């Protein structure tokens, strides 16, 4: 993505200081801060504290965490992977990246293992960029077709998205947002309805920030406005990412996605999930009731974080002290509500038979 005219990734290895650098996403959109990661502990804290988030980015960050651990202790491969695996339970890319690192490094000698780990991390990083760009290329024709059927009656193709599935959720480009970026680059006039995405407001703080940097028209809405917009014909397509997709096409994404899919089905609005193949858990036959749903601190619900009129960070309690909370981070949208799954290898039906072709 372009920041102040310069291309910036969400994560990269800095050779000059031999450290991993990330954008601290907890400070956006009010501050743009680059953070150095030098230890396994710092990587775990960055993932748990959501300085990095989004399934593809979590996977790449975890791989770099393995490297930083091996740099300090060449015999720490298993220990590092175990510790990283505990950071976030839902996104499958975390497990995928760690298994790939173990497979590629298990036979390496201690003297070479850190250098080999760094090579593998940089390869995963580069692959993620290509994969996400390919997702955009695969999905853009869907938006082109929708626009061609509507361009005589409206100014924009109206897309509703939930949470942030953009460049900040990956190394670059993103998943669902990659489709939007590619469509815009191809001349399709898009407008994005951005769900705020309570309780952490990734839509408000991250997706709006990305879209503004890209110059794409967008409007921030409360999470519960999506159904109204669909009912009144103001949404042409719903486009979301996924932290884990089951083999049958069930899609796990940020809490509230299921409600958008229900509203889309009720109002005849197509609903697509854009995911890298690495986010599909082919060992999981069904997602509903099977995917572990992360529960986070109740303070994410009871407090709202922002910036004051004096431009100072501020945290405000919005409920009575002591109020009971339960903070589910994700939900699962059944495959029958998903129009299609956009991957780097093309668009597939949300069925086991269709997705099986990715393995074959």
Image (cartoon, rainbow, N blue to C red):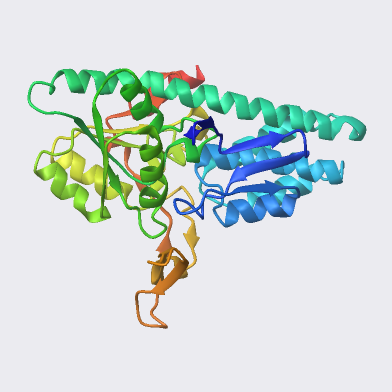
Q: Position of residue 314 (x, y in %)?
A: 45, 69
Q: Is residue 295 toward the left or the right of residue 191 in the image?
A: right
| 314, above or below 2, in the image | below
Q: In the depicted view, which residue is nearer to us: 278 or 291?
A: 278
- Give the image quarter of residue 112: top right
Which of the pair 244/70 is nearer the observer? 70
Please count the marks in the image. 0
**Quarter of the image holding residue 219?**
top left
Residue 226 spot, x, y in % from top left: 21, 48
Residue drawn 75% across and 27% down? 119
Give the x, y percent position of residue 66: 74, 41
Q: Is residue 53 visible?
A: yes
Q: Is residue 123 above or below residue 30?
A: above
Q: Residue at x 56, y 47 (%)?
A: 52
Residue farthest along the bottom direction in this orientation:
321
Identified at 28% across, 19% down, the residue is: 187
Closer-to-camera residue (27/96): 27
Instruction: Judge left or right: residue 313 versus residue 198.
Output: right
Residue 87 showing in the rendered view: no
For residue 68, side relative to residue 148 (left or right): right
Position of 3 with respect to 156 (left or right) is right
Identity of the residue drawn at 19% across and 22% down: 147
């Amino acid at each position: 993505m372009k920041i102040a005219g310069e291309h910036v990734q969400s994560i990269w290895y800095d050779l000059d200081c031999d450290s991993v650098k990330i954008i601290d996403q907890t400070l956006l959109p009010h501050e743009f801060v680059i953070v150095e990661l030098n230890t396994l502990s710092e990587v775990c804290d960055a993932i748990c504290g959501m300085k990095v988030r989004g399934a593809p980015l979590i996977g790449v960050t975890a791989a770099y965490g393995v490297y930083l651990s091996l740099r300090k202790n060449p015999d720490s491969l298993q220990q590092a992977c175990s510790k990283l695996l505990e950071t976030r339970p839902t996104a499958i890319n975390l497990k995928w990246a760690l298994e790939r690192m173990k497979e590629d490094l298990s036979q390496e000698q201690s003297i070479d293992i850190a250098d080999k780990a760094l090579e593998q991390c940089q390869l995963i990083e580069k692959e993620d960029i290509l994969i996400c760009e390919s997702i955009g290329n695969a999905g853009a024709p869907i938006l082109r077709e929708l626009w061609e059927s509507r361009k005589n009656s409206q100014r924009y193709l109206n897309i509703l998205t939930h949470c942030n599935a953009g460049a900040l959720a990956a190394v670059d480009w993103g998943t669902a947002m990659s489709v939007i970026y590619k469509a815009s680059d191809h001349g399709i006039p898009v407008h994005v309805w951005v769900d705020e995405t309570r309780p952490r407001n990734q839509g408000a703080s991250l997706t709006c920030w990305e879209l503004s940097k890209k110059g794409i028209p967008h409007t921030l809405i409360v999470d519960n406005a999506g159904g109204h917009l669909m009912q009144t014909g103001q949404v042409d397509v719903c486009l979301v990412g996924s932290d884990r997709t089951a083999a049958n096409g069930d899609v796990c994404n940020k809490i509230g996605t299921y409600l958008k899919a229900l509203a889309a089905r009720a109002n005849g609005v197509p609903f697509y999930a854009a995911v890298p193949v690495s986010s599909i858990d082919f060992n999981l036959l069904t997602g509903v009731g099977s995917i572990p749903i992360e529960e986070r601190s109740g303070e994410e619900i009871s407090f709202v974080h922002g910036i004051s009129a004096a431009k100072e960070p501020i945290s405000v309690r919005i409920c009575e002290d002591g109020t009971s909370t339960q903070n589910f981070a994700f939900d699962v949208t059944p495959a029958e509500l998903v129009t299609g799954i956009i991957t780097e290898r093309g668009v597939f039906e949300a069925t086991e038979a269709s997705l099986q072709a990715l393995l074959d």
